[in-house]
Amino acid sequence: MALVTVAIGAVLFANAFPMGGEAATASSLGTAQNFAVLAGSTVTNTGSSTVYGSLGVDPGTAISGFPPGIVTGGVIHSADAVALQAQNDVTTAYNALGAQACDHDLTGQDLGGMTLLPGVYCFSSSAQLTGALTLDAQGDAGAVFVFQIETTLTTASNSSVNVINGGSACNVYWKIGSSATLGTTTAFSGNILALASITLNTGAGVIGRALAQTGAVTMDTNNITIAGCIAAPETPTTTPVTTPATTPVTTPGTTPATTPVTTPGTTPAATPTEVAGGTPPTGGSSGTPVAPGGTEATPTGNATSTPTSGGTTTTPSTNNGGTTVAGNDTAGTPTPGATAQATTISFPNTGSVGLVANDNSRASSESRFALMAALALLFTGVGFVAMKRYRR
């Protein structure tokens, strides 16, 4: 009877306090230890969630809901080298946890209401937590708890995982073969390493990490912290915003091009030169004025003058009396008694254009001579008549 009583007591004690296996060991997370949240595809957040530690995603790039979510004590990494290495380290840790020997098979049992000692606990399918689960470290700060769950982990609302007697939530590992879902206001302890996704419903909190390898981490007003799990969390790096120096834009002053004003050069026309008894110069035309003293003289410069660049071609004019006028040039000295009369002369098909003194000068002289002769005769007749009367 005494032996039977001892055996029954041992069975009852074992059911109340399952003993863990000595094989349970902590798994190194490598660089992933700095992450409180790490997803494979995307991280989404609704509400005022707070993440203490780094947050990242890889190979996906999408991170949404921050803000209003807050990341403190860490850095956000989106598909960078740090997030990639962290995912590689998660995979290594995941495989190491799965390789540990199972101490107790709890398949088909609800974890709620249990008190477990350090060790490795396995589920061949899904695991359920309704209520409170207590993990007793028995005064060992390094006590390790490993849960190997082949498919999913689901907790009911208001459920909890509590580590007591000197243990640490940082030494509790949940290896999930598919996805984990924490019900509203669940207070959870430990590192969740899910092959697929992790969903934290409204108000759920985690002391530890939410690390999803291929799927998303979905948050809704949650608190997740790695405080106390690592000696030196990743220091947030503030990248200084460098304001580029503003290079003053110098607008070149537009100096208006000064168009040189070309004053047409005024080439004075050659002053006709009276040649006493000389031969008429080449280029002259018919009609030679009589120079004083009875010698015929032809004014020079009767040929067409070429205007200076920018000037205006002006057809020379012929004055009665031998005066040559070329445009605005200085005219020659007119023959005494001649009246200046500008006349434009054109000589087609001659090859040259010149000024010719017409016969008006000679006619005028002959008229004056006749007039003077007539007056002389008149005065002579009058005098003759007067003398005859005087003699009478």
Image (cartoon, helix red, strand yellow):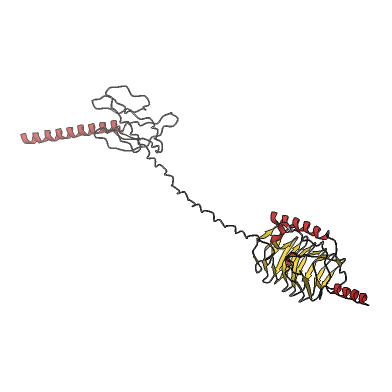
Classify residue 289 by image quadrant: top left
Question: Toward the viewer: 373 or 40?
Answer: 40
Tell me if 76 is positioned left or right of 333 in this view: right
Q: Is residue 392 visible?
A: no
The image position of residue 83, as x and y in percent, is: 71, 57
Q: Is residue 107 above or below residue 286?
A: below
Tell me if 252 is positioned left or right of 317 in this view: right
The image position of residue 392, as x and y in percent, is: 5, 35
Image quarter of the N terminus = bottom right
The image position of residue 258, as x and y in percent, is: 42, 44
The image position of residue 94, as x and y in percent, is: 79, 59
Task: Looking at this view, name the residue that lies furthest to the front.
Answer: 2
Task: Count all numbered tags in the image, as a single digit.
Answer: 0
Q: Is residue 205 above or below residue 283?
A: below
Question: Toward the viewer: 321 or 325?
Answer: 325
Tell me if 211 is positioned left or right of 327 in this view: right
Question: Toward the viewer: 10 or 33?
Answer: 10
Classify residue 69 by image quadrant: bottom right
Tell me if 278 is positioned left or right of 219 in this view: left
Question: Toward the viewer: 312 or 278?
Answer: 312
Classify residue 132 by image quadrant: bottom right
Q: Is residue 329 above or below residue 274?
A: below
Q: Is residue 116 visible?
A: yes
